Image (spheres, grey):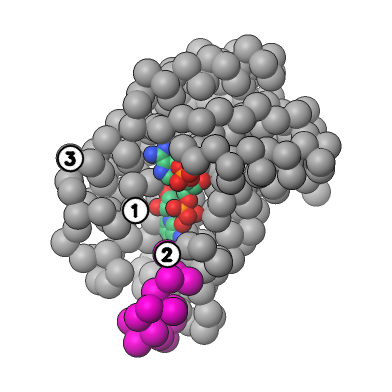
Amino acid sequence: MDLGLRGARVVVTGASRGIGRAIAETFAAEGADLAICARSPRPLHEAAQSLRESGATVVAREVDVADTDALRAFVDTAAAELGGVDVVVSNVSGGSAADWEQALRTDVLPFVALAEHAEEHLAASDRGGSVVLISSTSALHVAPPSGPRPYGAVKAALNHHAAALARALAPRGVRVNTVSPGPIEFEGGGWARRRDNDPDYYASIRARIPHGRLGRPEEVARAVVFLASPAASFVTGANLTVDGGFLDRV
Ligand SMILES: NC(=O)c1ccc[n+]([C@@H]2O[C@H](COP(=O)([O-])OP(=O)(O)OC[C@H]3O[C@@H](n4cnc5c(N)ncnc54)[C@H](OP(=O)(O)O)[C@@H]3O)[C@@H](O)[C@H]2O)c1
């Protein structure tokens, strides 16, 4: 199936490692051009160089998404240097931090700012603009690893906003979808750390995944790239779990 992404102009936040990097690589493999950001320069520019070697045009900027002015400027730079924006993927999260205000700054406000600021560019896209929010299964249940912490709660708030935006932006030809990964493992990521430092907890989570293993970043990335693409032209307001059956729900 041709996803129709050749030459698409794609913004991905937090693309220097893990799921965000796999998303950028999967878009590049489909022939898209990219604007990526992260805070640490070295892994960011290493990721950008590797994407360029695969043939993509890549804009890379050191941006902390909690600085919403810098995030808006990044979107403007992406649009100027790539000639527009067709797709925005909001991938960054503050993770499992215990600070509620920080979680609002790193998770909720950046997605709100990103979607608002990209709207005009996305509405102008010939392909039909598309937004994908990276959420989490932690938004959809309260059992471990979710629990009474900011992470699941702010992700649930984001799911609500994404679903509402999907209806609000549909008349402008812009689709908004959510991808909710279950536990995803890669070297340097949170679950690889738990595997090494807290093997009993890691094993207890793995035991609840019917596929018997954690997911891989590229398994999330393929779902994201499909939903973002013109191949999903009538899909909006969806929340696609990518979790090996971890969530027990209809
Ligand atoms: N991994 C999982 O098991 C899992 C499961 C469910 C959902 N998710 C969701 O998937 C997304 C990606 O997760 P991941 O595990 O791949 O994350 P990760 O390993 O923490 O990578 C995050 C990426 O975002 C960048 N980043 C972090 N904070 C940033 C900030 N304030 N501003 C700009 N860039 C920032 C990081 O680079 P710098 O640190 O250099 O900035 C890195 O490139 C998140 O939304 C997460 O909640 C992950």
Q: Which mark is residue 22?
A: none
In the displayed structure image, the side of residue 174 where residue 32 appears, left or right: right
At label 3, the amino acid type is: Glu
Respond yes or no on whether mark 3 lies under 8 Å from ligand 1. no
Q: Which residues are magenta?
A: 190-208
Reply yes or no: does residue 163 show up in magenta.
no
| Callout 1 amino acid | Gly
SS at circle 2 = helix
Q: In which image quadrant can residue 169 be found?
A: top left
Q: Residue at x 46, y 37 (%)?
A: 39
Q: Position of residue 53 (x, y in %)?
A: 81, 41
What mark, if any, has residue 95 been given in the picture?
1
Left or right of 209 in this view: 50: right
Asked if 98 appears above or below 188 in the picture, the reply is: above
Q: Which residue is pictured at 53% across the width and 15% down the height?
A: 76
Q: Work out whether mark 2 precedes mark 3 in sequence or the reverse, and give the earlier one.
A: 3
**SS at mark 1?**
loop
Q: Are marks 2 and 1 in contact (CB under 8 Å)?
A: yes
The crowding category of the residue bearing disc 2, from other C-alpha atoms within 10 Å (few below 14, some 14 to 19, many at least 20), is some
Cα separation between marks 2 and 1: 9 Å
Residue 1: % across, % down: 80, 48
Q: Estimate the spatial distance between the alpha carbons at disc 2 and disc 3, rounded to whole Å.
A: 21 Å
Residue beneath disc 2:
190
Image coords of residue 170 (percent x, y): 48, 25
Any mark on residue 101, and which? 3
Q: Is mark 1 within 8 Å of ligand 1?
A: yes
Which residue is located at x 41 percent, y 33 percent?
A: 64
Q: CA distance from mark 1 to mark 3?
A: 13 Å
Q: Main secondary structure of the magenta part?
A: helix
Q: Is residue 71 left or right of residue 10?
A: left
Work out whether mark 2 precedes mark 1 in sequence or the reverse, and give the earlier one.
1
Residue visible at 60% across and 20% down in the picture? 78
